[in-house]
Amino acid sequence: MQLRLKNFLLPCYVVLFCIFLYLPIIILTIYSFNEGGFPAQWKGLSLCWYYDLFASIEIWRVFLNSVFVAFMAAFLSVTFGLMLVYGARKFTTNIASFFYSNILVPDIVIAVGTLSLFSYFMVPLGLITLVIAHTLLGLGFTIPILKARLDELDPRLVEASLDLGASAWYTFYHIVLPFLYPAILVSTLLVIIVSFDDFVISFFCAGSSAQTLSLYVFTMIRSGISPTVNALSAIMLLVSSIFILVISLLQVRLAAHDESK
Amino acid sequence: MMNQNKFGNFFLKICVRLLFILFWIGCLLGFIFLSQEKKDIVEDRSLSIYMWSDRIDEFILQKFQQETGIKIYVNYYDSNEELVSKFEIAKDLNCDLIMPSEYIIQPLVQGGFLKKIDKSRCDFIDKIYPQFMGLSFDPANEYSLPIYWDVLGIGYTKSYFKQGLPSNSWAMIFDKKSVPCKQISMVDDSREAIFLVNKYFGWDSNKLTVDQLQDVINLFVEQKAWVGSYTDYQQGYFLTSQTYPLVVSQRERVVREMLVNDDIVFTVPDEGSLLFLSNVVICATSKKDDLVYQFLNYIYRYEALMHSCKEFVILPTIKDVLQDLPFEYIGVQGLMPGQEIFDRVSIFSNILTQKQINDVWIAFKSF
Amino acid sequence: MFEEFKKLIKSETYFFLITPAYMWQIMFLVLPIVFVVVLSLSAGQGAHLVQSFTLQNFYEVFQLSQIRIVVRSIVLASTTAIASLFIAYPVAYFLALHIKRFKFFFLFLLSIPFLINVLVQVYAWFFILEKNGVINHVLMMLGLVEKPLNFLNSYFAIYLVMFHVYLPFMIMPIYSSLEKIDTRLIEASYDLGASFRTTFWNIILPLSMPGVQAGFFLVYVVSFGEYVIPSLLGGLKHFFVGTLISEYFFIGNDWHLGAAFICLSCGILFISAILYYVFFNKITVRSKVIR
């Protein structure tokens, strides 16, 4: 490989690109440790905003709401996705493609439609309606992932197990499910992240009684800068990164596992 | 014989499938309604209130609960229009008391959602300033009683305008030649903005023709050149961070910053301005009259009102509370009822339909 | 008889399993959209939201103001999609064809911004761009300006942050389609003496077109209905499709007009997407390669 300028051009570009991508968030994280509120005053390192964050009752309440919605949505969408993917394993047509529209349709259309539907049928808006909407989103993520993984399962294993006299349930529980564990974990984490990150659907469908983390941050931003939100953003960033790390590691392990076969 | 069998099989198949579908739908509906059940278990000695998030302090509600044993469930809402549509859709909203703005009371009354207030059971009636009673939206105060009030005005930073503001007129925000700085911030509410234009042009505030509305739109489009942002929340932040030296704002937001920052001043222009009133109304479906009046008398008490007003920097309609309120919470001289600035402010009666108000906003923001 | 019944249920278990997901899809995706269309074609108040059939809503919504707003959103979405396409393509190319090791690390690095909360990113830019923010601070320290500049509440802020937020969305599709290219084709091209430019235009680009199209349409469609970024960073001076829909539903309280507007803007979006699709196909045909 010749050390010409041309060879450096592309890597430099990529590095600049990564810096641009990460700059705002890194700055945000740095300043969340700043004792002064505004960027113009660097008053020294301090964890005071984090203390404020953890001491605030309202943020905990809002956080627990978000956690409830995220876990319920993840549970429902993974369960239903699993059932669909397993139940439709013998179909020739690709069912998963029907669910791609969940991600493609603009959030706002889904949000408004769900709002109108629930209002018309007089279902009170709240955390439950939010769970329902997020499960819909989640299905769009879990089904492709689970289907991709299930397709890799050798159907002869299932046949063999059935031939040897195991019941359908036993086959599912002891052969198919363990094979799908990584995919299940990946999709659960993904749906949890997506649910935490979602704003538009919460904005329209949560009503005024239920507050989630995104809605709370939105209200705070509308009133100006607040250093507590800095600390909150830094924490959300950290948690998202950990989740993504786990997902990526799982996917690498899957790939390595398949290669070694 | 074979055909019959096949048909029977097919029919059974459809039945089984339908059964499955019904099972799942039943699960879903049960899931939804089970979660609603919990919400409906509301004890007898309790009240359900709908209000803005900064009107009554939690502390006062807790004290009330301690003193009387009545539990208060608070529901927050963001916009008055949302209230009306909520009521229209769900006949029984399970609420007892609401604290809406004045302009939404007429629609609520017309929809039959409110119950008449029995003034004899309220021990604070004679303490309310007469200037807040008998206004056009509820001439005999049959359905509503005013509790808080506020005004719209201009907030600015002293240090930017070293010789003071060039004038005390709405021309500073509407007239290109009189704008004293590069950019200002304007309210994001269509109704309020239309009223301000009305005052600026000196029109009759009980009538607005279509031509006048078109002039309003043209003025807004022209005004966009020097408006940095339209907001109902960020005015205080804009002043303290010196993003814009002049903002159009409710008095409450500016005075809140004035308490900690000497550099900020609030003023009401000479042409006059908008008066906001928060009122208490009782829902028609409420069956807990005793508790409601107990609560009303409690929140109108001297200590409760004083606490809320200091906490949220709003103004009360009760004479002794307002007179005892320290000046820094009022923010501008001459604002008491009967004084010069107060005489300039008035409410905006519902002469325009919601649709006309919306259309103005959409028309000019589409440019 | 009972045995037959049991056999029937067993053979129908798959239906039992696939029902909830489909049901969810139909009840909460298809039905709401149908409901929006029905709303746009009806009039009525409150509890009788769907009372009578009328085309009045469409007449009222098909005004110059609303069309201007839709066009504004289309311009925003197009600019975002095109800009991120050009900026993200080299990165995806580098990732797919130049990195042999550390691929996992780079993928991980590029997935994080993808899944961070939009609000956190908007807030981060808010923090940087505002009057007392980092950029103004640096500019003043360097003595380039005397008084801090206003970056926020402008088109500049909206476009910049949209571009930043949607950039990661573009990388993944292009990367996956670039990765699937058989490297032997590229090697063969170089072996036959073609320059980098020829190889790129005739082999790499056409073969990556599926990914390019996927990424483009993903970013285009999703950024069309964006609500958060124009609302928080634009100073609410101009309406975009997202903010106007929210205005109709929450502040204006006219759900019928709002629904009609959604139908109108989705219609225009669909037409523009088809135009882009035709354009992409023309490019692909022009540089088709014989495999």
Image: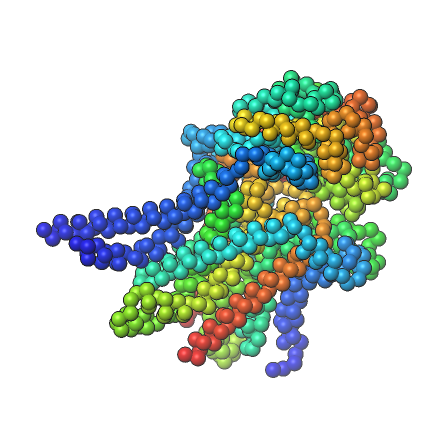
Left or right, residue C6 beside residue B220: left
Q: Is residue C97 above or below residue A239?
A: below
Q: Residue C33 appears at what percent x and percent y?
A: 44, 43
Q: Is residue C156 above or below residue C54?
A: below
Residue at (74% x, 41% y) in the render: B235
Q: Is residue A156 above or below residue B223?
A: below
Residue at (78% x, 26% y) in the render: B320
Left or right, residue A111 beside residue C230: left
Q: Residue B304 appears at what percent x and percent y?
A: 72, 33
Q: Residue B337 appears at what percent x and percent y?
A: 78, 23
Residue at (49% x, 67% y) in the render: C176
Camera-side residue of A90 and B221? A90
Q: Is residue C130 visible?
A: yes
What's the image's color scheme?
A: rainbow
Outermost residue toward the bottom in this view? A1
Q: Is residue B177 visible?
A: no
Residue C115, located in which quarter of the rendered image?
bottom right
